[in-house]
Amino acid sequence: MMNVERIDSSPLKTDASGTALVEGDSPRPARQTGFFRFFRHPVLWIVLAVAPFYLFDLSTPAFNDGECMYAEIAREMRLTGDWITPHLNGKRHFDKPPLLYWLIGLGQNVLGETEYAARMWAALATLGAALVVGAIGRSLYGGRAAWLSALVFITSLGPHLFGKLAMPDLPLVFCITLAILGYVRGFLIESPASGRWSLLMFVGFGLATLSKGLVGFGLSSAVIGLHAIMSGRLRSFLSLRFASGIPVTAAIAVPWYVAAARANPDFLGYFFIREHLMRFTGERFPPDECVALPVFLVLTFVWTFPWLPLVPQALWRAVRRLKAGPVLKGVDMLPLVWIGVVVLLFSASKSRLEYYAMPAIPAFALLLGRLWDDILEPGPASRRTLATALGVMAGVMVLAAFAAFAVFGPWQEVVFRFYATSWPTSGWIEGPEQAALLDRLRIPSIASMAGLAVFTVAALVAALKSRPKVALGITAVMTAPLFLMIHWGFLVVEPFHSSARTAEIVTRAASPEDVVVFQEPYEYMWTSGITYYTKRYVHILKDPRFEGVASRLREPPDRFLDGAGLQQLWASGKKVVFVGETTRGDLTDFLNQAAPVRVVGRSAIHYVLSNGK
């Protein structure tokens, strides 16, 4: 296969299949077009083959409280008919734009208020992103690199983990890749369809802005704008075609922001200043969770597993290809800029989480797809590259199996210390329930690591025997049992991440006329687990630390109680059910001062008390 290198800043020319060409290239024979051509494309069949691992059993485990926020806000939108102002437990909640809420609400109308109705959008977005990655790879590197890039993306650990959760991060990835595809096909490639493709970029901008606000728009526009500047294409990029697309983005994104601002005079300041600027700089109180920078950087690469061992080689070869010609003109510049923008932006943030690097995974997949395209060509250098990488990974997997035995056995305190340091507000403590969970995970974890080692050794043997296609297949197939084990792991840890079991206790103890009071959590979104699974509003026992904090909209005020207000309600004769966090101390003695307390039940993360039978 011919390697594609750009040596000037003029638009890329393409063959009949949309693959970039350079001077001297001859278009490949036109392939079958239309309906049949689409269904003959390898990328489509790869996505269809992997789809069951994304769409299977999305109804379990129960939502974690982060997922519940999106599902509950969508439910309250449906109940109130207010699709403009997001509400959580009846309180305005401006943390995120509404795209995912709207999609989940649509799913709930069709499939009911189920986990599947909420999670399917992230899964579908991940599968869609794989198709788009393949399309970008085809334009930059050619047909075989296209399906290799899609294969790498859809079988990587990160997209699978977060593509099965009701969260906006993988829908955001889809929006960003869509915008970049529109940029590549609309502005970098010279074809009769460039005008139509360019509109796709602006559609991606609009959807990204509705998905994650300024972060969504900023990431996609920064990647594209920086590449246009660095590659010397800014003058041709800022053209009439660009100007004609701006209204498309505005038509998609602006109406909701205008409507939200008209309905809520405090929306713009709260949303853009507190939820964007102050969160990014770490000035918002209470402080957001922030994963340590080394952990974030390491996980950025871990999310590419099992292709991780080849990432350094993929990056190095991309840089080497750029150095072989005018550095800023090569097609590899786009995925490198893509990775750099995402990683550097969130490295500077004071509120980064472990999965914030997801928008960079498609770019890693493109470079890895190009590397595998080279490896599949005959040549001793490529075989050495593959064998070395797989040899390193086999050794790491063997060590990981021994580490799993140690960490889940005699070194359990390492796990508790790691969680306490990296996620201080996670509620993970060293206790008998957590220790029992680690004991339950020990054998499957050791078996999983050992199994991955066996697969990797098999791929290494294939590479040493100069059978790179077999090595590729083994590496891809090893993700199937890994994905199944991940699903089992989610089921095991469900009691420690979901309020569903607590809600069952509350539902049995409280009739619709009774009052349910929930202890105000560090992040208000954690209230969503109780409200979603009990299908009711709850009162909130205020945390004194957050009195007068502007980022806390305590509304309606009569639903927020201080300690004296709770005691008064407890002694009023009306039945009250109180839910507290096990990590913040038991309030039994405090409530006993007002009226006798009955212990209703306890889950792994909450205790439930009542003042009545």
Image (spheres, rainbow, N blue to C red):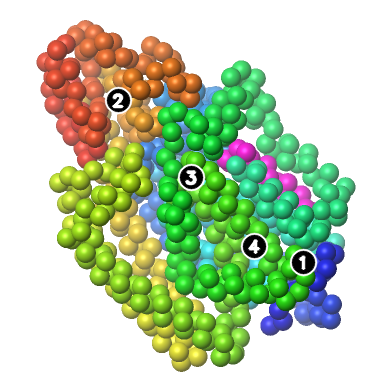
Q: Residue at x 61, y 17 (%)?
A: 265
Residue type, numbered disc 3: Arg
Left or right for 150, reference 297: right
The extreme right residue here reads 240
Across and down, in percent, residue 136 comes to 67, 63
Residue type, numbered disc 2: Gln
Q: Residue at x 40, y 44 (%)?
A: 115
Look at the image and tell me in which quarter the N terminus lies: bottom right
- Circle 2 or circle 4, nearest the eye: 4
Q: Which residue is mark 4?
A: 335
Q: Secondary structure at mark 4?
A: helix
Disc 2, disc 3: CB below 8 Å? no
Disc 1, disc 2: CB below 8 Å? no
Q: Which residue is mark 3?
A: 352
Left or right for 497, reference 186: left
Q: Which mark is residue 519?
A: 2
Q: Which mark is residue 329?
A: 1
